[in-house]
Amino acid sequence: MSSTKRVNPLDRYAKDLPPGRVLWIGLRPMRREPLQSVESALAVAGMGLEGDHRMKKTPGSGRQVTVISKEFIEQISAFTGITSIDPAILRRNIVVEGINLNALRRQRFRVGAALFEATQLCHPCARMEEALGQGGVAAMIGHGGLCARILEEGLIRLGDPITIESDT
């Protein structure tokens, strides 16, 4: 069997995305605890964000970090009728703006100094019904963001750019 990476014909357009930027970073020290908003975090290759509980339990996982966009949060807000959604209740590590996260799927991208690889869409879990009320899961379908693994260590900070890593 071949281990050739499947290529989506639309992948070639991802390199044309303008850069986005980091708006919010959240870490959860222990499972089921609230996320704590921070100004910076060290992304550790193959592990996760330093200080986040996932770093301890999922080395090598494709879900070391979760990313959602401000634009997706605005869609969730529109679907739920909640005028202001605190990013911490959505249980994602990084909130960005100005870049189409769906186009980043299976792509390598930089957030600040760190290199990430988007592995899959980040689907909502049943806890979103608790966090957002009835219909919370449905509101997030297609707007849950991305899961990613960290390929190269680096510091990420509020305001840092998020850019596609070119294959060339």
Image: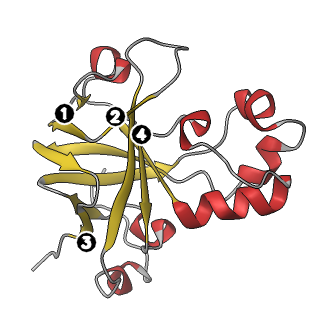
Residue 125 falls left or right of residue 18: right
The disc at residue 121 is none
In what element is the residue under mark 3? strand
User: Alpha-carbon distance for marks 3 and 2?
Assistant: 19 Å
User: Alpha-carbon distance for marks 2 and 1?
Assistant: 8 Å
Task: Compare marks 4 and 3 and give the one earlier in the sequence.
Answer: 4
Q: In the displayed structure, would residue 48 be above or below residue 148? A: above
Residue 64 falls left or right of residue 72: left
Three-letter code, disc 4: Asn
Three-letter code, disc 1: Gly
Q: Nearer the viewer, mark 2 or mark 4?
A: 4
Residue with the mark numbered 1: 46
Three-letter code, disc 2: Gln
Q: Quadrant of residue 17?
A: bottom left
Q: Nearer the viewer, mark 4 or mark 3?
A: 4
Residue 87 falls left or right of residue 153: right
In what element is the residue under mark 1? loop
Using a 10 Å C-alpha cutoff, classify the residue at mark 3 as few (fewer than 14 neighbours), some (14 to 19) or many (20 or more). many
Task: Compare marks 2 and 4 and give the one earlier in the sequence.
Answer: 2
Marks 1 and 2: in contact by CB < 8 Å?
yes
Task: Compare marks 1 and 4 and give the one earlier in the sequence.
Answer: 1
Q: Nearer the viewer, mark 1 or mark 4?
A: 4
Marks 4 and 2: in contact by CB < 8 Å?
no
In x, y percent, where is residue 42? 17, 36
Using a 10 Å C-alpha cutoff, classify the residue at mark 1 as few (fewer than 14 neighbours), some (14 to 19) or many (20 or more). some
In x, y percent, where is residue 167? 15, 75
Residue with the mark numbered 2: 64
Three-letter code, disc 3: Ile
The disc at residue 164 is 3
Measuring 37% from the left and 65% from the top, which residue is drawn there? 6
